[in-house]
Amino acid sequence: MSGPLLEARGLVRRYGGLAATDDVSFALQPGARQALIGPNGAGKTTLINLLTGVVKPSEGSVFLEGSDVTALSSNERVRRGLARTFQINQLFPHLSPIESIGLAISERHRSGADFWRVAGGHADIVEEIEELLERFGLIDAMDQPTRTLPYGKQRLLEIALALACRPRVLLLDEPAAGVPEGERQDILAALAALPKDVAILLIEHDMDLVFSFAKRITVLVAGRILVEGAPEEIAADERVRAVYLGEDGHD
Amino acid sequence: MSANAARIEAHLRRRERWRWSEIAFWLAIVVLIFAVPSRAALINEILISGLFALSLDLILGLAGVVSLGQAAFYGVGAYAAAILANAGYNDPTFGLLVGALLGGAIGLVTAPLLLRGSDLTRLMVTMGVALILGEVANRNGWLTGGADGLEFTMRPVLGLFPIGFSGQRNAALYSLVVLFILFALARRLAQSPFGLSLSAVRENRLRAGALGIATHRRLIGVYALAAAYAGVAGALLAQTTQIASLDLFDFHRSADVMLMVIIGGAGYLYGGLIGAAVFIVLKDVISGATPEYWEFWIGALLVVLVLTGRQRVASLARRVVRTVLPNAARQAGAA
């Protein structure tokens, strides 16, 4: 299929009189490296929730690989290849990284409701767990409860979990949020190494990260798309400087 | 297979093998039944309450769903077995099966009520369901015997082992076998991908859904299963005491079984069994000494347990055991 992997058409979400998302349309092509930026309150989180199905739109629709998924629940969208990470860690504190990743993979293999075989009995799942743990440098802490991991490792697990769903489209919600300077490189390296064929939408406040990662940038202001374009165009755009980047805009 | 893959598999299988302490636990019960036949009725009561507590632990410990209405399914199972026996279908195994199916079916039907709202909502809804079913049983005296309850006789288990007042040891053994089979099944389930996904739902429902887990369906599934377990426990109680009465649906039954799970600890499956033993033995000992004060002591135990933390009590107990049984401790370390 040559069309966009993920497409939003005329998405509107109203909360009372306020339109948190106001007629948003955009598309993610296969292999896209797109960033979504905007000042606080621009409606980035609402848009993510609309795309993933946590919130239903007041108007408009969401298409995944050409088919309308607006009516599907969020877990059904995951099964169709749309995964996300969270700005604030959403992990399983008392489960180990092995178990966390293992259950995500089992789910994708449709063996998540298997109540008879022991989870470790599936050789292909074990292999995949190992591959992901290695890729994200989590082998050392793999059998420890997640809550005992350093914050930076938890951020990496956050991304590893989303990848365990083997998504076609990945929404990264501020993956580097709160990561101390010393562990930041690990996150950047992990982002750079994400599979090439996965379409990625990065929501981020850190402009260095946005401009080093994204090939295309969408600017959201007050629930509407202000402008979309290549990084150079966005950096040069007067309106963007005015509403978002402020006086010391990126160059 | 690489060394890491082997470690990953070992980690996922770490609870698969039965440990010596588990085997000792089950053997000790068998020994106890034969060693103190005079207390077989009490042991039977503990085993059945243990199964009932296990049913609550399946939803509370594994999936994190609170309930104050587990007695609904206990009562349904008991009456299913009792009504069948009263009508002449008094084969114990058949009664258990029907108790499980009926309990499970009512669990399945009422489970969607638990998916929304907070823990408080769930406590109220589960309590409400138990009240409704209790009243239904009360109003349909033609079937349930109403306030008089139902009395009946059972055929021997598998046509071989008579249970009842003349066969209390058999009754305890019968309950033990049923408990063990259902426990082994629950133990297996807890380590399966299904069990793992329940842990995920308990720990973080938002993320569980974001990994593609159909959280509602998993919760409905485990709730129905737990209801079937409670149904079997109720059926066992009815069969081995040969009576079913309306108090099986009472609120205090649901509250007691919650206490048992909290005393023994939720989530590792033995908690309900240990809690049931502690609860019933304490009740027996204390109410023998000071009948009017036994609730005082169980209340005090609860307060101490919750405030000091079970881990500390358990680690103290382990230290005592280690000093007394250094040999056993060494084996435990090796296991």
Image (cartoon, rainbow, N blue to C red):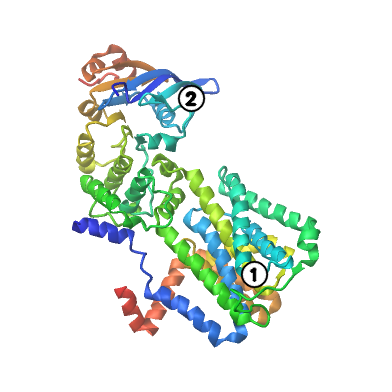
Query: Residue beneath label 2, please?
Result: A57
Q: Amino acid at mark 2?
A: Pro
Q: Judge by depth and name the residue closer to the eye, B320 or B158.
A: B158
Distance from the alpha carbon under mark 1 to that under mark 2? 57 Å
Query: Residue beneath label 1, please?
Result: B91
- Confirm whether residue B268 shows in the render: no
Q: Amino acid at mark 1?
A: Asp
Label 2: how many Cα within 10 Å (few below 14, some 14–19, many 20+): many
Q: Judge by depth and name the residue closer to the eye, B44 or A188.
A: B44
* Quadrant in which residue A77 is drawn: top left
**Helix, strand or loop at mark 2:** loop
Instruction: Have a look at marks 1 and 2 and say if they share a chain.
Output: no
- Rendering coords of residue B287 (x, y %): 67, 78
Quadrant in which the N terminus of chain B is drawn: bottom left
Quadrant in which the C terminus of chain B is drawn: bottom left
Q: Judge by depth and name the residue closer to the eye, B104 or B187.
A: B104
Which one is in front in this view, the residue at disc 1 or the one at disc 2?
1
Chain of the residue displaying label 2: A
Which residue appears at 25% of the width and 42% of the height?
A180
- Confirm whether residue B304 shows in the render: yes
B71 sits to left or right of A189 = right
